[in-house]
Image: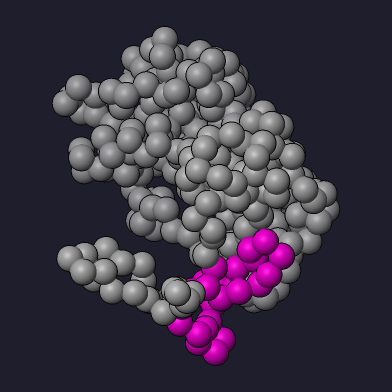
């Protein structure tokens, strides 16, 4: 008879590195952070493990949000909750708790980890099922909330701007899998990001299947031409970024900048006066040069004037005493 054990088992012929980390079974160090909320329990990071039959792991079947915390407030919490619920509806996943309860989970994580400025990763998985694809045989969705830190790009990039490449790989089409769904399946984005990494940079501009500019692997894109700001519309096949919408609704009026949604060809981006990217993790960051088919196109020498104005206003708001949660 075999008995269950929670000790690591050595496998003949397998290298030690191929085995799961023994840390997973180690008792939590006293005061170990971050504490992670996973399916109703608050556990230290080293014990925050999911069931291997969870379809979030098996198939990337689930949805998520990446959310900023500034001065202890959940930045644009309402918008993130609405998007999470829309993403879930679009993949026919019913989130088993209310939006208010989901916010309460996040506040519990912020408090448990003593977070003032940081980042929340909120995940809803399809849940534990069998090895087949059938999503509706997973009775209970999994809910995970991680409150930690994130630094996507080095600090000096925010002053100097970044270099990006244009991906050869198209963004997945709206018909195939609507990019408005922030799903756990990011392989399309990851493989595009690998193109960037291979070219020695960290972000990549993706075109849709019809050749229109859509977005980046983890950020939305804006261009400035003759003082006007342009960004691809939802129809271009993008994730409707919360930061993107904040630029449109709040930063542009505050800074007196005209904004238009517009389908764009890559040539327009290459000939723009300024280009910048937005994302919850990235915030606002200038693109100073773009590589396409091995040729480098210089956009600006450092951060452009409009980008700087918008980023300065953004930083003012998120460091103020009235960080908006809605
Ligand atoms: N596009 C993609 C593909 C993303 O993953 C993200 C989020 N990292 C964004 C755009 C930006 O969205 P948000 O401003 O809501 O973070």
Can you say whether 284 is above or below 30 in the image?
A: above
Q: Name which residue lies at 63% across and 60% down.
A: 145
Q: How many marks?
A: 0
Magenta residues span: 25-48
Q: Please, which residue is most extreme toward the top here?
A: 210
Q: Nearer the viewer, residue 1 or 306?
A: 1
Residue 4 lies in magenta, yes or no? no
Instruction: Report if residue 276 is visible in the image.
Output: no
User: Which residue does the image show at 65% across and 44% down from the upper left?
Assistant: 138
- Whole-percent x and y of residue 159? 38, 51
**Figure quadrant of the N terminus:** bottom left
**Residue 325 vs residue 12, the one in the foreground:** 12
Q: At 49% across and 49% down in the image, what residue appears?
A: 57
Q: Is residue 90 visible?
A: yes
Q: Position of residue 46 (x, y in %)?
A: 48, 74
Q: Residue furthest front?
A: 1
Q: Is 251 displayed left or right of 263 in the figure?
A: right
* Rendered image quadrant of residue 18: bottom left
* Residue appearing at x 53%, y 35% in the figure: 133
316 or 131, which lies in front?
131
Q: Is residue 42 above or below residue 223?
A: below
The image shows residue 238 at horizontal and vertical percentages of 53, 26
Q: Position of residue 259 (x, y in %)?
A: 60, 23
Q: Residue 35 colored magenta? A: yes
The answer to whether 297 appears left or right of 21 in the picture is left
Above or below, comparing residue 184 to residue 40 in the picture: above
- View extreme (bottom): residue: 30
- Quarter occupied by residue 288: top left
Of 161 and 141, the residue lying toward us: 141
- For this view, does 315 lie left or right of residue 290? right
């Amino acid at each position: 008879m075999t008995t269950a054990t929670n000790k690591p088992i050595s496998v003949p012929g397998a290298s030690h590195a191929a085995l799961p980390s023994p840390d997973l079974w180690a008792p939590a160090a006293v005061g170990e952070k971050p504490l992670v909320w996973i399916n109703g329990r608050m556990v230290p990071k080293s014990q925050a493990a999911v069931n291997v039959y969870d379809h979030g792991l098996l198939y990337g079947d689930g949805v998520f949000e990446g959310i900023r915390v500034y001065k202890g407030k959940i930045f644009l919490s309402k918008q993130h909750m609405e998007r999470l619920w829309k993403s879930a509806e679009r993949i026919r996943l019913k989130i088993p708790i209310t939006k208010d309860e989901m916010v309460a989970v996040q506040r519990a994580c912020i408090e448990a980890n003593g977070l003032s400025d940081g980042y929340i990763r909120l995940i809803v998985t399809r849940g534990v099922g069998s090895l087949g694809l059938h999503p509706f045989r997973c009775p209970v969705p999994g809910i995970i909330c991680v409150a930690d830190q994130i630094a996507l790009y080095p600090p000096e990039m925010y002053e100097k701007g970044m270099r990006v490449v244009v991906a050869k790989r198209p963004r997945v089409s709206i018909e195939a899998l609507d990019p408005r769904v922030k799903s756990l399946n990011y392989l399309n984005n990851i493989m595009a990001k690998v193109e960037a990494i291979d070219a020695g940079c960290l972000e990549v501009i993706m075109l849709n299947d019809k050749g229109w500019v859509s977005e980046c692997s983890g950020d939305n894109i804006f261009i400035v031409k003759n003082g006007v700001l342009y960004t691809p519309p939802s129809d271009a096949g993008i994730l409707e970024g919360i930061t993107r919408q904040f630029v449109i609704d709040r930063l542009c009026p505050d800074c007196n900048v005209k904004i238009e949604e517009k389908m764009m060809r890559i040539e327009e981006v290459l000939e723009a006066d300024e280009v910048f990217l937005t994302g919850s993790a990235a915030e606002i960051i200038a693109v100073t040069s773009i590589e396409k088919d091995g040729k480098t196109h210089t956009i600006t020498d450092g951060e452009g004037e409009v980008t700087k104005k918008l980023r300065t206003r953004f930083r003012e708001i998120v460091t103020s005493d009235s960080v908006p949660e809605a």
